[in-house]
Amino acid sequence: MRIISGLFKGRRITAPKKLPVRPTTDMAKEALFNIINNQYYFDDISVLDLFSGTGNISYEFASRGTDKITSVDAHFGCIKFINETAEDFEMNITTIKSDVFKFLEKSKQKHTIIFADPPYDFDVEAFSKIPELVFQNDLLEDEGILIVEHSKHTDISHLKNYAYSKSYGGNVFSFFEYKS
C-alpha cells in the first residue's frame, strides 16, 4: 500500500503478512479521498477510523494534514503496527484496541468523518449496527459523514441515514449523514 497524497505522497507501507487485514486498494482510496477533498479541509477535521487494520486510511488523512485521528481495531498486532508506523512518520494518530461495537456504545466524542471498513463477510445485520450506533450515540458533527466500506455484494442502502454510494471495482463506499 502507498500514501496517495500529501506530505508523505508516494511512500510505501508494508504491513506484516500475519495481520488479518484487507487494505483498501489504492484506486478506491484515491477515489474516496477525491470525494472527501471536495467537502472538507483536512486540517480542520476530526477522523475516527473503525476496523482500522493496517491504518491505511488513517495514514492518508495524516499525510493530508489531519491531526485529530483515532484508529480503533480489536487486533493487537494491527494496533501495534499503526503505533509503530505513526511514530516512524511522526503522525498524530491515537490508537484504541477495542471491539468496534463496544467502543461505539461507550464513545461520546464527535467526529467530522467516521470511516468504517469492517470485514466484507459481515452479514447485513452486523453492518447495520455501525450507522445505528453512530447516529444513536450522536457521534458525528453536524456536517459530518459516516463512510462504510463494503463489498459490491452487500446492499446497505435501506439503512437509516443512508445518503449515497460510490463503487470502485469490488469496493463500495456507502455514505451516511444526518437528514434535515
Image: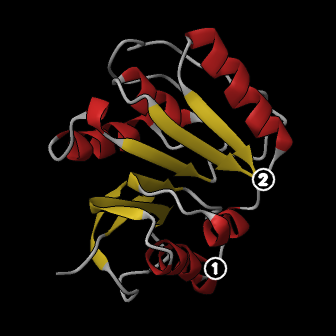
Q: Is residue 140 visible?
A: yes
Which mark is nearer the camera, 2 or 1? 2
Q: Which mark is residue 74?
A: 2
Q: Position of residue 166 (x, y in %)?
A: 28, 61
Q: Is residue 57 visible?
A: no
Image coordinates of residue 81 in percent, x first then y, are 74, 28
Name the foreground residue: 176 vs 106. Answer: 106
| Residue 38 x/y as whole percent | 14, 43
Residue in the image at 34% along x and 23% along y: 65
Side of 62 where 35 appears, left or right: left
Q: Which residue is mark 1?
A: 126
- The amino acid beneath tag 2 is Ala
Q: Quadrant of residue 126?
A: bottom right
Which quadrant of the rendered structure holds the N terminus? top right
Q: Secondary structure beneath disc 1? A: helix
Q: Is residue 78 left or right of residue 2?
A: right
Q: What kind of element bears circle 2?
A: loop
Query: How busy is the neighbourhood of tag 1: few (under 14 within 10 Å), some, or many (20 plus)?
Result: few
Figure colour scheme: secondary structure
Quadrant placement of the C terminus: bottom left
In this picture, is 136 found above or below 106? below
- Tally the marks: 2
Q: Residue at x 38, y 63 (%)?
A: 140
Q: Nearer the viewer, residue 155 or 60?
A: 60
- With respect to residue 179, does 36 lie above or below? above
Which residue type does callout 1 highlight?
Ala
